[in-house]
Image (cartoon, grey):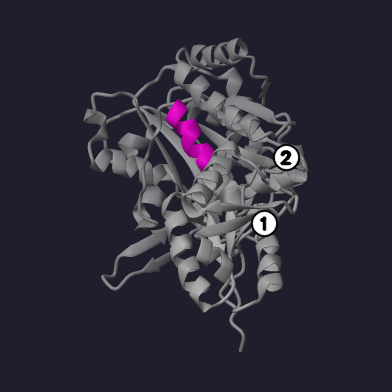
Amino acid sequence: MTIRIPRGTADILPGEVEKWHYVEAKIRDLCRRFNYAEIRTPIFEHTELFQRGVGETTDIVEKEMYTFVDKGERSITLRPEGTAAVVRSYVEHKLYADPKQPVKLFYVGPMFRYERPQAGRMRQFTQFGIEAIGSKDPLLDAEVIAMAMQFYAELGLTGLRLELNSVGCQTCRPKHREALVGFLQDVQDELGAEDRSRLERNPLRVLDSKDPKTRELTKDAPSILDYLCADCRPHFEAVQSYLDELGIPYVVNPRLVRGLDYYTQTAFEIMVEGIGAIGTICGGGRYNGLVAEIGGQDMPGIGFALSIERLLLALGTEGIELPIRDELDCFVVTLGETAKQKGLKLVQEWRQAGLKVDQDFLCRGLKGQLKAADRHKAKYAAIVGDNELAKGVVVLKNLATGDQQEYALAQAKAFLLKQNEQGVGL
């Protein structure tokens, strides 16, 4: 029986993985400029972390987590998102005591959710996220949003739509909840079973329903924006003012509540058209109560997360080609056993100098080796035979023009290094 890859996962093969390298390099450069440091947390955590941190009434916890009991009879879950794990680490390692505040962190790594696979949505996916913990200032909200928008812009994406909302706090949400429950009770008999259960446990999540009928029934539901308290209203207005100052366009969407229970105040999503059923490519917001929920001091936080798979899908949809360098600086062609031995030493020396070099391993002749050099997109072929060995030279052939010239070995290395620095052949 042929063993195949599990449903909802993907192999990232040569030719495609270079795009990931490029995007990941962009991520690290962006985070360097915004002064975010990398954090790496385990791929699995105690299940309670996500139950408490993400919320027991969320789709993630109720239906999508990969949970198992280990040999020590502990309930363990493959991480379905990154924020809860970062906050757990923040608390456990007392990062709140770091003199550099707020603590600004980023992560890149695999997440796991048992969902129906579709375009841009996999059961194992890779997430880039940032977390800034320790400040209530709406200026930080604007920075986080600006960082996400700048990331997409630098990769060439256009047609982005930023949706913004405030989901309030523990002061103003109860009043909105009361009004919302009263509204939903009038239409509860027409709601689906899942949305009726949410009405009792977490009515705000009904506004996040994907059921078209529910969305129509709730189009006139009370808006959280009409109930914002004396802290949340000016905070939300300040966020909008800072975005206006930065020239970042946005749309206020009072139905935007996100799918995680830890959000407070600012919530946002970045949308793009043409990537299948899922138009959201980035989501984030504030989580001012999450640190305390996980067992730490009551510290405010904000962040975002995005799927690299969905990003690459959006880039492909817009026809954006990433500037990937996958060619060789040189392919060493050897003729005869003695040249083969000397060629091995030459390849190793040039690699140690920083050049990208390969050689023949199939015992092909001159013509076959030159064809292999073309397949590897080599800029030059370095031809070494008995005549070249006798003279202490190598013939460098420009595979784009066909021109060739003899160089002493040291001069050949210097020439190739210079071409590499100048980007010749890109």
Q: Which residue is mark 2?
A: 215
Q: Main secondary structure of the magenta part?
A: helix
Residue 377 got which mark? Answer: 1
- Report helix, strand or loop for mark 1: loop
Say the numbered circle drawn on residue 337. none
Say which element carries label 2: helix
Q: Is residue 244 left or right of residue 171?
A: right
Residue 303 in sight here = no
Rate crowding at label 2 as few (under 14), some (14 to 19) or many (20 or more) other CA atoms within 10 Å. some
Which of pointers 2 and 1 indicates the residue nearer the eye? 1
In the image, what residue occupies the spot 60% across and 28% down? 149
> Where 180 sits versus 318, above or below?
above
41 in the magenta segment: no
In this rendering, position of residue 350 left or right of residue 299:
right
Whether residue 229 is visible here, answered yes or no, is: yes
Q: Nearer the viewer, residue 106 or 216?
A: 106
Mark 1: amino acid: Lys
The single residue placed furthest to the bottom in the displayed view is 1
Q: Position of residue 381 (x, y in %)?
A: 63, 58
Amino acid type at mark 2 = Arg
Q: Which residues are magenta?
A: 25-33
